[in-house]
Amino acid sequence: MLAKLFIASIRANLGRTLLSVAGIALGVALGLAVHVINQSAISEMQQATRTLSGDADLTLRGGRASAGGFDEAVLETLLTDARIAPLIAIASPIVDMTVALPPPKPLQQHMQPVQLMQEEQKTQNQTTTQAAGKKTGPATNQATNHATNQTSQTIRVIGTDIFQAARLQPGFVGEAFKGGRAEQQKSADDRAMPLATLQPDSVFLNRAALAVVGAQTNGSTSLSIPIGLENKTINVIGKIELPQFKEPLAVMDIAGAQVLFNQVGKLSRIDLRLRPGVNIESFRSDVLPLLPPGLALTTPQQRDEQSAAVSRAYRINLTVLSLVALFTGGFLVFSTQSLSVVRRRSQFALYRTLGVTQRELLRALLAEGAVLGTIGGATGAALGLAIATLALKKFGADLGSGFFAGVVPEADWHVATVLFFVGLGSAAGVVGAWLPARQAALEAPARALKANDDAGGGATFLPPWWAGATLLVLSAALLALPAIDSIPWLAYASIAAMLFGVIALAPIICAKALSLAPQSKSIIRQLAARHIEKSPGPSAAAITGIVASFSLMIAMLIMVVSFRASLEDWLTGVLKADIYVRVGRGNSPGSSEANTLDTSTGAAFQAIRGVEHADYLRYKSVNLNPDMAPVALIVRPLRDDVLASLTMLRRADANVVATAQLPIVWVSEAMVDLYGLDAGQTVTVPIEGVARKLIIGGVWRDYARSSGAITIDRDAYIAMTGDTRINDLALTLTAGADKLEVMNAIRAMPNGDRFEIINAAEIRKLSLSAFDRSFAVTYALEIAAIFVGLAGISATFSAQAWARRREFGMLRHLGMTRGEIRRLLGAEGTLLGSLGAAIGLVLGFAIALVLIFVVNRQSFHWSMELHIPWLTLAILSVALIGLTAVSAIISGRFSMSRQAVLAVKEDA
Amino acid sequence: MLVIQKLTKQFPPAPPIFSDLDFTLNEGEYIALMGESGAGKSTLLNIIAGLEPASSGHLRLAGQNLLTENHQHDDDAATLFRRKSVGFIFQAFHLLPYLDVFENIALPLRLNGWTGQDITARVAEMLDAVGLNNKASALPRELSGGEMQRVAIARALSHRPKLLLADEPTGNLDPDTAAQIMALLRTEIQRNGATAILVTHSEVAARSADRAVMLGKLGIVPRPI
């Protein structure tokens, strides 16, 4: 019987049933695709990290590898200290750099605008969510094209002590090319002997690098790598087999790498294998205090977690957003099942009369929902996997955040994950079918069998007011709780509680609003208002769809507009100079230590005609907590005008700062959230291996580094470290100076082609453009949700037209023309749309506040100002009301049919 | 009041439900239209009300020709005529569940452009007539079947229609209530000066009419009651 019920329902509502399945399939597909793409990127990055660490138990790091590393004396300590050395089986020192290969011809004209300010970010995949720098489209302005960098292929260069690496990372041992120089120089008995690696100017390349470089396997290929203002040449003497590492990779002797990258005496990391029986956690806790400050010992698992944690908030936010479509898909099932239940009301009553129990009927209808959901889920899962595979092949793993720019993994998915998403589809089907099923099961059969049930037959179940009120109280309470493991789960739960609370209260709010509204003189508008006011149940389904989809759209809109406006303000502040210059054209930000200038070269910029002054910028990174991601240290002149240009959120009391007699630093908001720091407090920062006590002068807003940033005045930094090197220059031009002339003058300098020159205005423009593109995914998801919501509204109105056919028939008997019935439907649609839009606006505004002030803050540790796009909200509201009215008229056209006229005779 | 000539209704390819009907109803007359199930009583009522086109024939109501040359209705004209000049009573009452008794009765008045005090006075008069003064603000779900049909009678006559069409108005009521309703209906028809057609299978109900006719294979013929 259940199967017959189901098949009959499908036949009767084929179109709408397919729409429901499609709604769920869309939600599941989006959710799974986003999850698989992100997971594939994470897996790829983790696999790469693990491949490079080999069988190490622990890795010793200092700050960011590319931003200074640490003194190689630490290796000596590990190998000679009597308390440490006996515990270590292998210690493999590594220099790890990412540098650009010479640009291919023709040049690819890409820019990485915001990266100028977020040095180090890409290396650690810690770029900001949407504002972060990433490869953007070709510059449109000719001058800009000339002025900006042409990004070329980068290559990871690993400098290693091959004798240690051979034991820990055997994949680093290369195989010399036959007949090549290296092979001729080494003993003939073992071409794979690591000795070849010891040649300081020679590298072994993996397959990806060989493909990029086009190396000849006869050993004749030499590679020119731009380092700082020089082009250094290295010889490709062989290949390495590391199939797990898919990006271009070069392995060379560590001493050669230190010289090549101007890193003599510095290490990026030391990979450690402990002796059997040594407890890793005990080693960490016992050994770290014996080493200089600022170092971190991490297990491979911790590195995986850290690597994933950096982008986790972004990934989860995107997945949650994609599941909004699934939520609306569930609503579509609700609408379709409501319609189906209304149409089959008398059938169910007959079944009940013949002895089918309430529970059996409920189960049958829930099974219908589950089957629809499962079909939708399975279809969506297949679609999602296809989308993910295609997107990864076509566009790589980056969905707009910049977190995974350049990562092109294979789709990495597990059956369990797919089953989970199919299960979500099934759950959406069951949840969507629940209320209609309950309504059908609980209805008295005798009543449903009677034709003259004008007293509200088919009334929809309405949750009691206290349920909605309780959910709203719960929502407020959840907001007071902190993030769990840096993910705003409770804030999401608060949004869900708020959404369902308001949806539960929506019919009551509508009825109250209409009872208080002045009565219209038009009988049509009167009837429309009275129907919604006095029959809240049937109206609830339509209102639910409108409120749910519209509020989420409004919330996202307000959040995005607020974020964009705040980002624009922030960009204006941080990009105060007119032109920015980076040393090492074409190099990735992951090679800042290899690409520096001295002050004498920097002074040459000061002498360029049209340059008022040149600020020297230096980027380092520091470890404040070994278990957390490194923090960016930004060294720059901090004059009053520079401080004024930062978005300063609060400053320390001047007396407190003066009394402390310590160097002043300015920390980003993330430092407040992650380290509990605040203006006026002191902080100990390990800089160049020495723990420095500093006073925090204030807290500034930073949209570039969600792991935290510390800004220090250049003079104070030089006084502490003696490091006068320069990574970037910020050039402020004299009034009336021609930017193009200044750029040309820079290019005319010795090695001028080694500078990356960027116009600040263009950075702003391209950064905002990157922001907009990043949110394109968001908009697409929202539009999908809105259309699913509108489809649900249409289904609801169709259900209403069917349920109320005798009412419309009676009105036709009383003398209402078809046009008047149409206007009545339109008036009801307009009223419902208006009420839904009003409630959706208020709810959307409330959700936006949670997104802006709680979710974003907890996820990314930055704040933003609230900006409300009034005009856009007004246009959207009018559009929604219009669409609802049109949908009501089109979906309710049955009401004007002859069948409706004859329905007054129906013996239901 | 109502003149029907050569009226035929057919839903092709089925044979005609009725054909070449001739019938005249005088002003103020109240007749019972009887006949077997499927004889076309309700269809005839719908054609008279302008809700259903005829296949052929002529129909004049209150001096107005309601069928066009090709026997079709001008829907809007028929609707507006129905709004002003016709009242309906249904077996299933068909009160709007979201309007209270007062508003249900006021509905035809509002549709006909009545306003304010005129509506209040007329609805009060009708409530008094059907004995539901104390139920003005009740919703239909708070009424019994008999009360709902009283409201339906009040609604059907509130705008003083020239023609009242009642289709099995006692079909859903117990005999005692049915008798009360028929008595009330007759009184109100007379009080409002309406012409009325009562479609019924009930001999008892038919007895409330001035005369009865039978719709069958021979057309509309007198029937003793």
Image (tube, rainbow, N blue to C red):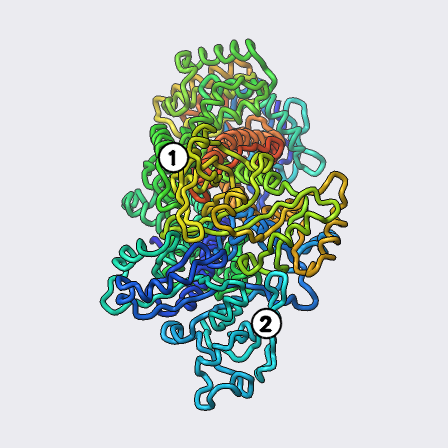
In the image, A394 versus A174, the foreground residue is: A174
Check residue A212 in the rendering and tell me which mark sits there, or answer none: 2
Specify whether A407 is left or right of A281.
Answer: right
The numbered mark 2 sits on a residue in which chain?
Answer: A
**As drawn, A23 above or below A89:** above
Check residue A479 in the rendering and tell me which mark sits there, or answer none: 1
Please tell me how crowded label 2 is: few (under 14), some (14-19), or many (20+) other residues with Cα within 10 Å: some
In the image, A638 versus A500, the foreground residue is: A638
Say which element carries label 1: helix
Please tell me how crowded label 1 is: few (under 14), some (14-19), or many (20+) other residues with Cα within 10 Å: some
Task: Compare marks 1 and 2 and give the one earlier in the sequence.
Answer: 2
Q: Amino acid at mark 2?
A: Val
Question: Could you tell me which quadrant the C terminus of chain A lies in?
Answer: top left
Asked if one can make out residue A803 in the rendered structure from this viewpoint, the answer is no
In the image, A894 versus A768, the foreground residue is: A768
Q: Amino acid at mark 1?
A: Leu
- Gap between marks 1 and 2 measured at Cα: 51 Å
* Residue positioned 38% across, 73% down in the render: A164
